[in-house]
Image (cartoon, rainbow, N blue to C red):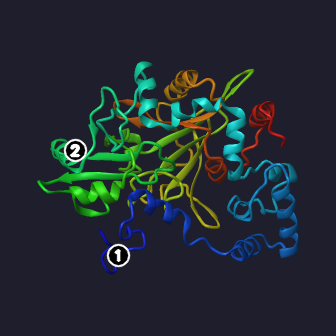
Amino acid sequence: MAAPDGAPATARRQGESAWDRDLRLWTERKPPLTRYLQHAVANSGRSPFSLAREYIGLSRGRGRLTLQEYVQYGVYDPSLGDDERSRFLTEKLHWPIVRRCNDIAWQAATEDKWLCAQLLERAGLPQPPILAMIDTTERTFPGTRTIRSDREFGEFVRGSCRDGTALFCKPSHGLASYGAFVVDGAERDRLHVEGEGWIAYDACFAELIGGHCYVVQPMQRNHPSLARYTERLATVRVYVLRTDSGVKLPFAALKMAAPEHVADNYWRPGNLACDVDPITGSIRSARTKDAFGTTDHLEHPHTGVRLVGERVPRWEDIVALTLECSSIFAPVRYHSLDVAILAEGLSIIEVNTGGAFNIPQLAAGRGFLTDQVLDLFRACGFKG
């Protein structure tokens, strides 16, 4: 389905799947590198030579920062000391470090969403129910309705989208919510996809889904204290280190989607990430981001409701659930959880092998390489 004339740049292109569209949006329109240096000069009052020399040293140091990261994280800030700067870590080292810290044979247990759901269900841990799997291969999903064709897809959607029920669809092996979409209406020959409009079932199945394996779940709703900020489902990202001296939770972040987005991942423009004290659950900062850095907010930028200084509801329960879930994935010594807070309780949205370094660094303005993190990463062979 081609995008109509005058459609926004975020519209899908002819023959483009939802996954391909999101990947394109994430990668395109990045400013030239010279703009990053110009931004740092303008915002620091420092000379280009001083900044370039500092950046080159950090790019060769333990954090291996790229120029974009050096600027986005605000590492050029003259108020930072050398030790603080050296603790920022490039996203490019994420998977090399993850492979050192974790038993990589366990990766499918977190990254395959259906498989992970079976482990969580067996443990009796709360999560969104899987209503169906969409998969055109020969793989089976015992006990789960499996959709193989556009005809079966149409039957399922018509039977599910009743009385205002909406469906959240995401790739089973997805990262960063690429390809996620919401179905919020159904008729005999077509369905309504939020942000896309009405699409015939066969076109949606062949093009929007595009052969990817998808998980279909019901939309979940925020706890009332979070619904004050957004109607979109918010999640708390909790980072977990399983060290020889016990389990550590070095970072936590509350993520919220802007009204125009279906998911809260930080790469989507306008989404919000809040630095949360992992001990108390207090929100210490709230930031949106752009190509060159972050903007601080005391209140939610869309609703005006106070954020900084507020406490994430049910924080002790979130920590307890994180620790209980983490024990199932003990061979994954560095991982993270995304937890939703609903009116009826908590819900584990995903378990992640590792966890992006950029979220806490952007949300908090501090480097990822705390002493706790360094102890585990060095014990696993990191040379930094």
Q: In percent of the image, x 63 and y 33: which residue is there? A: 104
Residue pointed to by mark 2: 165
Is 199 placed above or below 163 here? below
Q: CA distance from mark 1 to mark 2?
A: 28 Å
Which is closer to the viewer, label 1 or label 2?
Answer: 1
Q: Quadrant of the N terminus?
A: bottom left
Secondary structure at badge 2 equals loop
Q: In percent of the image, x 61 and y 34: which residue is there? A: 335
Secondary structure at badge 1 equals loop
Left or right, 352 with reference to 144? right
Which one is in front, 158 or 305?
158
Q: Is residue 279 visible?
A: no
| Residue 148 occupies quadrant | top left
Residue pointed to by mark 1: 7
Q: Is residue 18 visible?
A: yes
Q: In percent of the image, x 87 and y 53: which residue is there? A: 82
Q: Amino acid at mark 1?
A: Ala
